[in-house]
Each structure stands twice: as structure tokens, then as C-alpha cells.
Amino acid sequence: MFRTAVGAAVAVSAGLLAASPAQAATGTITGLAGKCLDVAGADSADGTAVQLYDCNGTGAQQWTVGGDGTLRALGKCLDASGNSTADGARAQLWSCTGGANQKWTVTAAHDIVNPAANKCLDATGNSSANGTRAQIWSCTGGANQKWNAPAAQTGETCWATHYGPQPPGALTASGEVFDNNADTAATSLSRRPQLPFGTRVQVTNAANGRSLVVRVNDRGTFAQTPQEPKCLDLTDGAFSRLGGTLNPDDGHVVVTQTVLD
């Protein structure tokens, strides 16, 4: 462990750290090989393909899990093509109609089910290649039907800070060479239980709704106190992508953190 947390002490209530339902129902939906459910070409036209793609933080990968059973991106709904309930019906983006082919249930087992078809959202051919189409298929429990969706989880609200400059070749507590632009993070030593190295955590900025998934590869040296209740120390790159300011006097944001696996 080579580092100390950055950011000024922030006076907030200890109650901020209480576990609570995730406030943001918007964020990425990740599936096979950690890739994101994506609207092809960020095109909001009716009929645009929905696919797997490398996570890139764009609006084409931001999904809102609605209380009405819809999954929405770019202002439109995830839709089973042609109102079909057959295996292999393609998933697409379409204007929201309220139809049964646009209703989805996110289960605790990480399935996304279309109840009308009684089928699961599925990465075609068990492929994780960029551009793999999403479809509906009879639920098998396979990895290509498992998804981490924002409303399927619960989270904690807390402060996240950022590392700041580190010496060349510095190592994290896990032994990795530190990369200040990677989507990685350190967790507070005061957290009980400690998150194992490799744990993926979805982090959502409470102020702007921006969300990304980081991997834990370090331990913080900071103590979590009512005066400075920090839970994550993010790389400068990840912190910036969430909309944080890289400023030693203002280097903290309120986030919801959700442990994915």
C-alpha cells in the first residue's frame, strides 16, 4: 500500500453512510465479459439495434429502469422486435408504446425477463464480441443472460475522492502498477467487511447521475469518520469521468456505490 487519500475534510452527517435503496435508477447495464448494453451508433431512430459493446460512458449506454417496467435509453424503450415472443426475437430501440414487448423485470438472479414471452434478454450466440445483438431467448441461466442493472441492486451513499499525482511505477496494495486513468479504486480500510481485490463496484455521482463500474485494486489509508466519511478513492480518470473536479480543495463527490460481484 503506497498511498494516502486526497481531498479536504468534509463535514457531513454520519447518517450519510447508511445503506439504502439505490437513488438512481439510471446507469449502465453490464453483461457478458463486463461489456455494456449499448444502442448501436448512439442512434435514437426506431429499430436501432441493441448490442453488447465496450463500456465507454456515453449516453447510448445509460439505461433508466422505470417503475412502469420499461428499460429506456436515449428517450426510447428497449423493445422485442415485431412484438414477437419467439426465441431469437431481436432487441431494439423503439418509441415507447406501453406494449407487453417493452416490459421487463430485473430479477435478483440478474436476469432481465420479458414476462409476456417468459424469456430472458440474451447475448446472441454466447458471444461477447462488440456488436453482438441482444435478443430474447428461453431462460437458461447461462452467463450470456446475466446482467447487472442499476435497479437490481442496493447501494450506499458516501463520499468518493481521487488519488491525485502519484510517482511513476507506484504499486497498488494488490501489487498492480498504478494507472491513474484506469477505472479502478481503493476502498477505505475502515470498511467492514473489506471488499476483495477484483470486486466490481458501480459508482453513480448523486449530483449528475453519471455512472461507471470500477474494479477494486487498492486499500486506502484514510479513516472513515463522521467528519470525513470517505468510502472510495478513485483514479483521477474515473473521478473526472464521473464529473468530479480535480482540485485538492474540492476533490470529493457524493456517490452511490453498488457492489456488483
Image: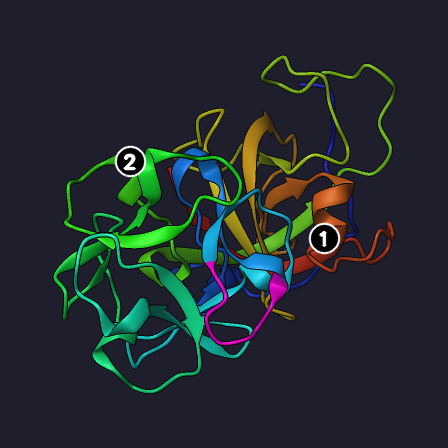
Nearer to us in this view, 43 or 171: 43
In the drawing, does residue 213 fall left or right of residue 220? left
Kind of residue indicated by mark 2? Ala
Q: Position of residue 220 (x, y in %)?
A: 63, 32
Q: Residue at x 87, y 53 (%)?
A: 247
N-terminal of the two: label 2 or label 1?
2
3D distance between C-alphas at marks 2 and 1:
28 Å
Determine which residue is flagged by label 2. Answer: 143
Which residue is depicted at the point 47% across and 60% down? Answer: 49
What secondary structure is marked by label 1? helix
Q: Is residue 160 above or below residue 12?
A: above
SS for tag 2?
helix
Residue 210 in view in this figure:
no
Magenta segment boundaries in residue numbering? 42-49
Q: In the drawing, does residue 177 fall left or right of residue 32?
A: right
Decide which of 58, 16 is in the foreground and name it. Answer: 58
